[in-house]
Image (cartoon, rainbow, N blue to C red):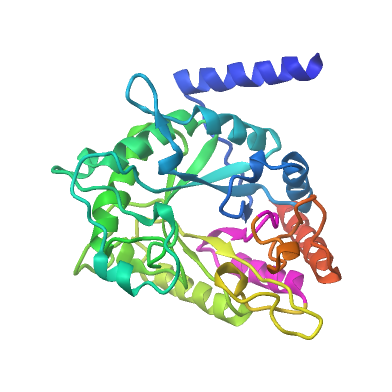
Amino acid sequence: MHLMKTLAFTLVAASLCVLVGCSAPNDPSRYGVDSGGVDWLDEPNSQLIAQRGRETGFKWVRVWINWEGIGRRADGHWDFGHVSQRYQRLVSEGYSLILVLSGSHEDLPGEDLRDDTARKSCNKSIYSWAQPPARVAGDARAQHFYGFARDAASQLGHLVAAFELWNEPNTCRRWQGTKQDYKDLVLAPGYYGIKDSGQIPGYVVAPATAGGFDKSWVEMSNSNRNYVVPLDYVSFHSYGSVATTKARMNNMWTYFTSHPNLPAKGYWLTEFGHGTTKSNGNPSFNDDVCGFSSVNNPGAAATSIYSHCRAFGACNKIFYFTLSDHVYDNRNGFCDVGIFDVDGNPTSDRKGRRKADAIRADILEWDDRL
């Protein structure tokens, strides 16, 4: 009975926040974890995994929404009700949230701008959400992504502190348009949609480019440091060796210290991570996210990068990939990239357990100083 009353109170409070506005949880901690690109909140043991993530010390979690899975309400607005309860559960566990917005709807009118050249040259399978939104006449607020982002922020902004616009648009399998298409159809419409919702803090983060920060995805064409929109933070992903990721972080420090008047207040490293190795020292798996630099002690690799983030002020948030092995499960031949397995335990080998223990010790030590 007590549990039912608590849940009912939570749902009523969430409904009031949608109507009158509430600030989303915005933890000062740097440390977050990626959900793995899937909504594992519907999976068995999801509550246990979320609890284990908090026990490890993570205060932020990066979750995803693909537009193709969102329907419309009777009033014509996009309906995020079914995901709101999932995110409320994470907030109840003590997380602050960053939500990745991506995808399009095929039934929306406009000019189909998929780049045939990019499609033909892509040497990997193309995700269904890689298609750019159709272009329509008018400015950024006239584009379809504006309404999608505005409705997402209006309905989820009391739970979600930050919104990231797309995921790795500089890879052909995740973006089938041009760079200018991204700026016109996602970056500017998404930014204005979120800001026009009036939600607090309503951070807008972009462009989540793979292989380091690529400023050309957020700057005006033929411009020097003039952003298309005044982003709160810029973001990127970095895999590979520890040295490679640290070099990219050094580049960001130079970028921000050399250009003190940038609109962005710093950067968020929204994906980094390390898979474990087989006993013979070879990578467990070698494709896409499992193609990380495999290291004998991934926990030490992670904490070394955490230390580098703390040493440079421009590093505002850092997210380990990934929380659990729901997708990249070593029992299905994949690498141990998750901190926990599908049952909520540290990934099965001793290296996986050391990873969880090392990350926990590092985060808890430094967050105690906040």
Q: Nearer the viewer, residue 256 or 360?
A: 360
Where residue 125 appears, as percent x and y from the top left, is 45, 66
Question: Is residue 55 among the parts visible in the rendering?
Answer: yes
Residue 321 colored in magenta in the image: yes
Where residue 89 appears, as percent x and y from the top left, is 66, 33
Side (left or right) of 22 relative to 135: right
Which residues fall within the magenta stretch?
297-326
**Where is 241 relative to 147, above or below?**
below
- The residue at the point 81 percent across, 81 percent down is 279
- The residue at the point 20 percent across, 48 percent down is 135
Where residue 320 appears, as percent x and y from the top left, is 63, 61
Q: Nearer the viewer, residue 196 or 38?
A: 38
Side (left or right) of 163 relative to 29: left
In the current view of this chain or complex, which residue is farthest to the left?
137
Callout count: 0
Where residue 130 appears, as percent x and y from the top left, is 38, 56
**Where is 235 relative to 53, above or below?**
below
> Which image quadrant is residue 263 in?
bottom left
> Which image quadrant is residue 293 in?
bottom right
Side (left or right) of 242 relative to 282: left
Question: Is residue 166 among the parts visible in the rendering?
Answer: no
In the current view of this chain or complex, which residue is farthest to the right?
350
Residue 247 colored in magenta in the image: no
